[in-house]
Image (cartoon, rainbow, N blue to C red):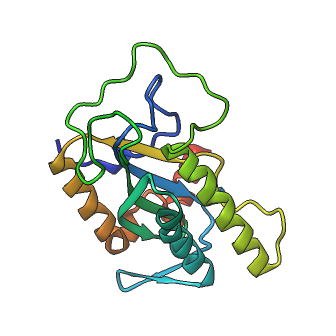
Amino acid sequence: MPYDPEKHHRRSIRLKGYDYSQAGAYFVTICTHDRECLFGEINQGEMAMNPCGRIVHEEWVHSAQIRHEIRLDESVVMPNHVHGIVFIIDDGSRDVGATGRSPLRTMHPPSEPIFRPGPPKESLGSFIAGFKPAVTQWVNQMRGTPGLPVWQRNYHEHIIRYEDELNQIRAYIRENPLRWETDENYPHRLQNLQHQAS
């Protein structure tokens, strides 16, 4: 099945009972508050990051340097969102039977839901919970807007299960700036959709 951005990555609720600390590959999208274009602009199919966009990129890369459980793959900072592929890896301290360099072929949720206060350590949620506040702090410090929200409250993820799907998502991320005017987060498209709904 070809990758469909409308169907596959617009998920704001985690898969019930799924353990996001287990090894695997995840496609993540994090959008800005009110989809505001904070991070730069698209010029002739290429993303030109402003200082806020460079903060996002630097913090994304820095996350892999400080978190031994993640490896980052393809990513792109867009004017009002960031896309990236994140691998949660087995560092030898967990018995999950997979590596972070390839997606898992089978990922079955546990029979019982996992209830924990906040995201578990060494999980996709803990990565995002560290990344978003760090970016917010640096962006607000730079622009002199303490306390102003930078991100939407949640994030979107898609569990990548197969190699061909991984490659399709990599291509989607790389080509995202080329398709900006048809992107679901493109400001004029969002305004048109809001106008049609009213």
**Is any atom of residue 188 visible in this view?**
no
- Which residue is at 49% across, 67% downward? 65
In depth, the one of 188 and 145 nearer the eye is 145
Side (left or right) of 145 relative to 66:
right
Q: Residue furthest front?
A: 93
Side (left or right) of 105 relative to 122:
left
In depth, the one of 95 and 196 nearer the eye is 95
Vertical arrangement, residue 45 with respect to residue 83, above or below? below
Name the spot of residue 123 as percent of width and height, x first: 50, 43
Name the spot of residue 41 as percent of width and height, x first: 51, 80
**Is any atom of residue 131 visible in this view?**
yes
- Which residue is at 52% across, 63% downward? 63
In depth, the one of 35 and 196 nearer the eye is 35
Q: The C terminus appears in which quarter of the rendering? A: top right
Q: The N terminus appears in which quarter of the rendering? A: top left
Q: Residue furthest top?
A: 111
In depth, the one of 167 and 43 nearer the eye is 167
Name the spot of residue 153 as percent of width and height, x first: 66, 47
The image quadrant that residue 138 belongs to is: bottom right
Name the spot of residue 172 as percent of width and height, x first: 28, 61
- Which residue is at 25% across, 45% downward? 103
Q: How many numbered discs, if any?
A: 0
Side (left or right) of 195 relative to 189:
right
